[in-house]
Image (cartoon, rainbow, N blue to C red):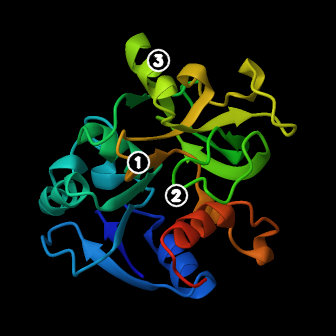
Amino acid sequence: MKFGVVVFPGSNCDHDMIYVLKKKLGQEVVALWHKDKDLQGVDFIILPGGFSYGDYLRSGAIARFSPIMEAVIRFANDGGYVLGICNGFQILCEAHLLPGALLHNTTHRFICRNAWIRSETTNNILTAATVPGKALKIPIAHGEGRFYAAEDTIQSLTDNNQILFKYCDANGMINPEANPNGSTANIAGICNQNRNVFGMMPHPERACDPELGNEDGKLIFDGILRSLCVNT
């Protein structure tokens, strides 16, 4: 399987993602420069975390208009798989490939620490290898990670089983104290109605190596590979 990792000016998790996909999961990976329009025949696109274009205006607002995003949007609309992590999630919302928006954390501070999340469904490739309700320890690193959407949008996400992850405590319990940024309904990740575009604020690529003492994030990539019938 061939993955493409988009690199914007200010991306800082692109090499982390490439390392995990290539070295830990044995997949073919290409870096896709933001000025390019050729997706090089990839099967799956990842928009990594970072601070694209310095987060000017608001996170993801400028990156959404990068030349490569024209191809990414076409790819997604044609059914191609796209995952946005942290800044990548923000870009997907700005591009209207996912509903809602990512606002400043309620603390108005940058948060960088481990967080607990739990999957809410297995009805998509991103959570296929997880156990709903079981807490996963995944790092977060963001200043604008508070997911917000109108009440009817939240209801639609719920009704359509599009909420992938919610912030929880170590026991898998969802409560206000476990919500690090004030996200509506503790939401940490969602997908589109067609279940081929995914966004999440936590960084699973930072929890895939036993040398870091945490491999909870590998379950997310395992689900992708198993669902798409790739040998891991």
Q: CA distance from mark 1 to mark 2?
A: 8 Å
User: Of callouts 3 and 2, which one flags the residue occurring earlier in the amino acid sequence?
Assistant: 2
Q: Badge 1: how crowded within 10 Å, few (<14), some, or many (20+)?
A: some
Q: Disc 2 marks which amino acid? A: Ile
Q: Are marks 1 and 2 in contact (CB under 8 Å)?
A: yes
Q: Most extreme residue toward the top, as rendered?
A: 151
Nearest to N terminus: mark 1 or mark 3 = 3
Say if mark 3 contacts mark 2, CB within 8 Å: no
Earlier-in-chain disc, 1 versus 2: 2
Q: Is residue 115 left or right of residue 170?
A: left
Looking at the image, which residue is at 44% across and 46% down? 199
> Does any portion of residue 75 appear in the rendered image?
yes
Mark 1 to mark 3 CA distance (whole Å):
17 Å
Inspect the image, locate mark 3, and give the three-letter code of the amino acid beneath it.
Gln
Residue topped by disc 1: 195
Residue position for label 3: 155
Residue annotated with mark 2: 125
Above/below status of 105 relative to 189: above
Q: From the top left corner, tell me how far across and down residue 117 is, in percent.
A: 70, 42
Q: Residue furthest right?
A: 171
Q: Mark 1 belongs to which amino acid?
A: Arg
